[in-house]
Structure formats: C-alpha cells, structure tokens
Image (tube, rainbow, N blue to C red):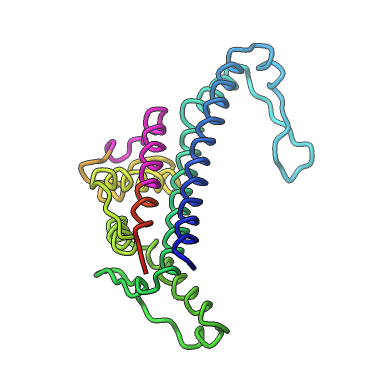
Amino acid sequence: MTSKEYKDKLSGFRQKKQKLINDTFLWATLAIKSLEVIAESDEIIKNTSKFQVPSTIKGKTVNRKPADIKAIIQNASNKEIYFTLFTYIVAQFEGFLVDTISLVLTYDQRKLRVNIQGNDNNKKVDISELLECNTYESVIELVIERQLGSLFYAGPKKQVEYLEKVLTIKADEKIWDKWFEYKATRDIIVHSSGLINKIYIEKVGANARGKVGKQIVVDKNYFEDSLATIKSLVGQIEVQAKKITV
C-alpha cells in the first residue's frame, strides 16, 4: 500500500462517516417535525387508532385511544428517537475506529507490537490458527482481528491509550471524557433501559449526568452535542493518522 493509497482511504473513512452523521441528523430532524405535525392532526390520529402490528398471528391488529397515540408520538419525538439514534451514532464511531485501526496496522505493521499495560491486546495467536492461514497477508489479518477483539473489551481509557499510540494521535482530554460518557450512556440505554446504575457512575465519575436509579437524559441538546463531538473526533483522528510514515 502506497502512502497516497493509505491517505486516500483515511480520507474516505472520514468523509463517509461525517456524511452519515450529517444525513442522520437531517432525516431525524425532519422525522421529529413530521411526528409533531401528526400529533396535532385529529384526522390522522383518528385513522391510526387501529393498526396492524408485527405478530406471528397473521393480520394481528391493536387499538389505541387518541390520547394514547398522541402520548406515544410525543414520547417518540422527545425521547425514543434520540435514544435510538444516539446508540446508532456511537456504534458508527466505533465502526470508524475499527476501520481506521485496521488500516493503520496493515499499513504500518510495526504498530502490531504496541502493547498496553493491563490490556491483553498482544496475546499470542494459537499455532493451529496460524496453520490455517495460506498467506502472509492472512496472518496479519488474523493478528489484527485479535488485536481489535481484545481492544474493544478493554475499558475506554485503555482503548484511548492504545488509539493514541497506534494512530499517533493526541486529542484533547476533555473530548475523550465526553466520549467516555457517551459510551457509558449507550451502555445503560442498551443494558439498563436508560436507568443510571453504579457501573455508569464508576465509568464517568464527576461527569455523571444523574444519580443511580434516575433516567438518563438524551434530549435534543445532548444529541446534537454528541454528533458535533464525534464528528470532531473523526476529523482529528483522520488528520493526525495521515502523518504516519513507513
């Protein structure tokens, strides 16, 4: 892989991810506005009172009172859409990290030796797995796969330590703190129905956004701030990783 090919791929990763974030924000904004219009339309609400739902029973339908439908729509536009899309964007940024790390490790294989104390990212590969590799390239792919698998089981701070060494980057500590909190918020949305627990508090410390047992808030302001921060991280990572030379 030439230096130009490497840099072009990095640029492609950045452009694709930032475009996805912008596009997601666009359609989410339009969707929320549409829901707000629907909530104010008695005619639409009336025609939605009985609707078919996914079910193993063919043609299954349910009924909802107009007041209930309005409440469902308002909850969706004020909370559920933000919960769902925030989780999606966090996953998309992790996908960007996987793509970028894989590319860097392929381009500069010296970085496969990077080891982080307290993280098993450099564990040995079983000989039987190596024997199944037909080419040198497939061996490298196997090692990279193991590195990534171990990395994303590590804590956020160990991940950042690894990222900064492998990608030769240095982002502002405050922006990483925001990322730690985003990941912790995503985790309680997925695993705790959005209720703050002790694990969340332990992960983010002074940056916690509530107390144990309270519902985490992911509103319009928080959602937009997370998109702006993640886009900034994508840009910083791409610009600094381009400086890697072999």
Residue at the image position 51 percent from the left and 40 percent from the top: 19
Magenta stretch holds residue 230: yes
Q: What x and y, as percent, mark residue 94?
A: 44, 53
Residue 79, placed above or below residue 232: above
Q: Which residues are magenta?
A: 209-235
Quadrant housing the C terminus: bottom left
Q: What x and y, as percent, mark residue 144?
A: 44, 71
Outermost residue to the right: 58
**Would residue 51 appear left or right of 240 to someone viewing this image?**
right
Residue 197, placed above or below residue 132: above
Magenta stretch holds residue 13: no
Residue at the image position 63 percent from the left and 19 percent from the top: 65
Residue at the image position 36 percent from the left and 42 percent from the top: 232
Quarter of the figure with residue 134: bottom right
Q: What x and y, as percent, mark residue 95?
A: 48, 54
Frontmost residue, 204 versus 141: 141
Residue at the image position 47 percent from the left and 66 percent from the top: 2
Frontmost residue, 201 versus 219: 219
Residue 234, placed above or below residue 137: above
**Would residue 176 appear left or right of 59 to someone viewing this image?**
left
